[in-house]
Amino acid sequence: MTIGRVANVAGVSIDTIRFYERQGLLVEPRRSFSGYRNYSEDVIDRLRFIFDAKRLGFTLKEIKELLSQGVKSTAECGPVTRKAEAKLAEMNDEIARLQRLRVRLRKMVEACGGQCVPMPASRVRKKEISWKS
């Protein structure tokens, strides 16, 4: 299968396929006598795995690690589950951080009572905004 056909079936660009080859996510295919890349059918499954894993929040580096461990499906247990649990913990930490920030911001807005006025420029450090009530 040519690179154009793979790109069409997988719904990606030719450049994406070449990029994934350079990153080691796809095995460089055999070449025909005329120099064209000749992909096997399993490259479509591998591309689907990459896109599924990206949608779940995995980085390309993490996906490469999974592929090097022989993981072929995002439905597989083991390595995918452990990575997914770690990714979920990271997301929960970020959500908690954003919730704390939201509470602080809400308190600041409420404390101003709608009367927030920027401090004079002479009292504000460069590229920093301060507010006084």
Image (spheres, grey):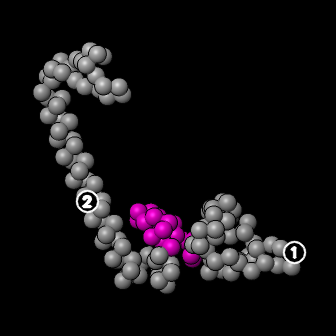
Q: Is residue 72 visible?
A: no
Q: Main secondary structure of the magenta part?
A: helix
Residue 49 in the image: above or below residue 120: below
- Pointer 2: what residue? 92
Identity, as a three-letter code, of the amino acid under mark 1: Ser
Residue 112: x and y, percent?
A: 15, 23
Q: Position of residue 23 (x, y in %)?
A: 59, 68
Residue underneath mark 1: 34
Stretch in magenta: 44-64
Q: CA distance from mark 2 to mark 1?
A: 52 Å
Question: Relative to residue 108, is residue 25 drawn left or right?
Answer: right
Give SS at disc 2. Answer: helix
Locate residue 98 relative to residue 13 in the image: left or right: left
- Which residue type does callout 2 highlight? Asn
Which quadrant: the C terminus? Answer: top left
Residue at 30% of width from left, 71% of height from top?
85
Residue 10, how many percent across, how many down? 62, 67
Q: Return the disc, 2 or 1, that comes first in the chain's sequence.
A: 1
